[in-house]
Image (cartoon, grey):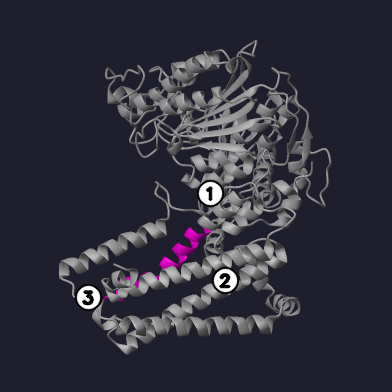
Amino acid sequence: MNLPNLLLKLPRLLRFLLIFIVSLTLLLTLLRVAFYFAFNDPESPLTIADFLNSLWIGFRFDLRMVVVMTLPLFVLGGIKWLSPFKYDYARIVWLLYLSAVFALYTLFYVFDFGHYAYLNTRLDFTAMRFVENAAISAEMVWESYPVLWIAAGIFSTMALFVYATHTLFIKVKNQSAPHLTITKGFAFGFIAFLVLLVAGYSKLSQYPLRWSDAAFSKHPFATQLAYNPIHYFLDTYKNGRVSYDEKIVREYYPIMADYMGVEDFNATSLNYQREIKPLHVVGTKPNIVVVILESFAAYKSSVSGNPIDPSPHFNALAQNGIYFKNYFTPATGTARSIYATLTSMPDVELTGTSSRNPLIVDQHSIIQDFKGYGKAYFIGGSASWGNIRGMLTQSMDNLHLYEEADYESPRTDVWGISDIDLFREANKALQSMKEPFFSIIQTSGNHRPYTIPDNHYGFKIREDVSQQEVQKYGFASVDEYNSFRFMDYSVGHFMELSRKSDYYKNTIFVFWGDHGISGSTGQHVTPGEGRSKLDIGALRVPFVIYSPLIKEPKVYDQVVSEVDALPTIASFANISYTATTLGRDMFDERYDDKRYAFSITHSSNPLIGLIGEKYYYRTRADGTNAALYEIYSDTPLKDHSQGNEAIVKKMKDLTYSIYETSKYIPNFNKREAVKK
């Protein structure tokens, strides 16, 4: 049976949609090929693999946009009085609708080509700034482009589209309609719905196709080629709306330059760049293994003195390593934590997370200064979560990203493979690396549904504790308590495996929590940790450096932040690095008189603050509800602003300096903008 006969067996609406979707998607693919020939740099050509992958990813974005375009016709076109094959007026309405959407798509493509020709970037929401100066922009376009020829091309394209679509409507109308029973008609409709759903979702995985999937290559044009202009514009509009005020940033520049230790002070260019020499000599090009533990709140862990001892393995590492007990993440949320880690600045994006903003994904990261190091990132599930894939691949050269599909271990739950299997898989991969490596292992099992896998390698679930007892010490349930214990057991299992490996003796292991947990913190910590008080427990996590290269364990009391992690690791590993953001070496005594941790609770009017040694200054971004709290007081919500005006002013100025500067820097911290 040939293809035309097969098509005739379909209902006429599905017949039309199949031909229309395939034809228009192929047209958009041809436009992508035209984009390649128009803008590909022959001096830096794409590899065949990158070119084909860009086309494949782009094809899927294009298909999604065509499916979205046809959804109203699919949903409503089967209704008798709205059928384009039964009534002329309905056909005209649908022709007008499809033509209007196609006209919009066409304009996007025209503006996208022009935008790239002008700025070498795809059309994004920042192009709206040209509308603010419409007269000047229109004049520039008129003088720079053959506007009349372009307009003629648009009208010709529209005429061809209207003609072709109308012809297709008429041709399908004149074909015979198959005689279908209600059951067969429903079956056809349901199958068609599933096909469109898969086409729109575009990935056989937990997460749909996202813009970060386009950031698969270090070649910038490969990513540019993969984008769909409409999809990309909407992505950047949705996730890229944090704005900065350069005038305010300039006002705060002296404070920030002093805080960051900028030697080349330049208030005109707003220079934040520093060239940092290491303070330590630990090993010879030591390997780095960073372990970011899911929801590893300090108050829940054994290092806080928790009587029910949830993390004895981690506690042993802290006692035999270097432990920072006042380490804070800027915010809750794992995607924000990964952003803070990689960029060394807090995520102040309000409408989403910065990892989801394609305009600032290619940030300079200190990881790039680990020259000659292999890079690996291990996650039990999918890196499409939170769109961190794009951020990871852009932050680490030659990154080997390990995800659920790369492992032999079975999937445990929605978070992928279990933590203990993740550590086992990571250990196996690290043993095969021949060069010094920088690796990050991100756990995710300490989440609901708190699954303990059947194969848990000797872990024993505690059933001798009551709900009441675990709630006294910071856990919502016995299941959560055992999940936390299993995460700790997995850490211990990993360290046991690594001690038997060849890489262990020249490796620095660094552990911290991606964030804490807002909740009832328990009787063993000060009241300010709790959700009903200052909620510091949502931000305080343990930070431990452990290595056989460390000769003397030590505990540090100074306040430090997650943004300080990479500068500290680089310095400790004897790596010179370029710092461009807020992070500072935790060991560098130059900063000891200005040790603070910035915090932000995201909302339309975010709660921002600064944690110091004694006080926590907190305010709404608009200046309301400002107060100075004593962190370790038995009455932590008492405002101590009166009588401490100098402290309030200092902490307020630094709070707003960090907040406003963190809006500004990501826009000027792209890899190619950093001077080496």
| Amino acid at pointer 3 | Pro
Closer-to-camera residue (661/55): 55
Quarter of the view holding residue 501? top right
Q: Is 87 drawn above or below residue 236 in the view shown?
A: below
Q: Which label belongs to residue 178? A: 3
Residue 523 visible in the snapshot: yes
Q: Residues within 10 Å of mark 1 (few under 14, many from 20)?
A: many
Residue at image x 55%, y 24%?
432
Quarter of the view holding residue 648? top right
Closer-to-camera residue (241/509): 509
Residue 332 lies in the magenta stretch: no
Disc 1: which residue: 353
Residue 75 lies in the magenta stretch: yes
Predominant SS of the magenta segment? helix
| Amino acid at pointer 1 | Thr
Marks 1 and 3, how far apart in space? 50 Å
Give the mark, 1 or 3, whose residue is nearer the N terminus: 3
Give the mark, 2 or 1, whose residue is nearer the N terminus: 2
Disc 2: which residue: 108
Q: Are marks 2 and 1 in contact (CB under 8 Å)?
A: no
Q: Secondary structure at mark 1?
A: loop
Q: Which label belongs to residue 573? A: none
Q: Secondary structure at mark 3?
A: loop
Q: Residue furthest top?
A: 551
Q: Point out the stretch of residues depicted in magenta.
A: 58-78
Work out which quarter of the rendered image holds the C terminus and state it.
top right
Closer-to-camera residue (275/7): 7
**Of the two numbered discs 2 and 1 in the rendering, the one whose residue sits closer to the viewer:** 2
Marks 2 and 1, how far apart in space? 26 Å
Give the left or right position of residue 589, taking residue 394 as reference: right
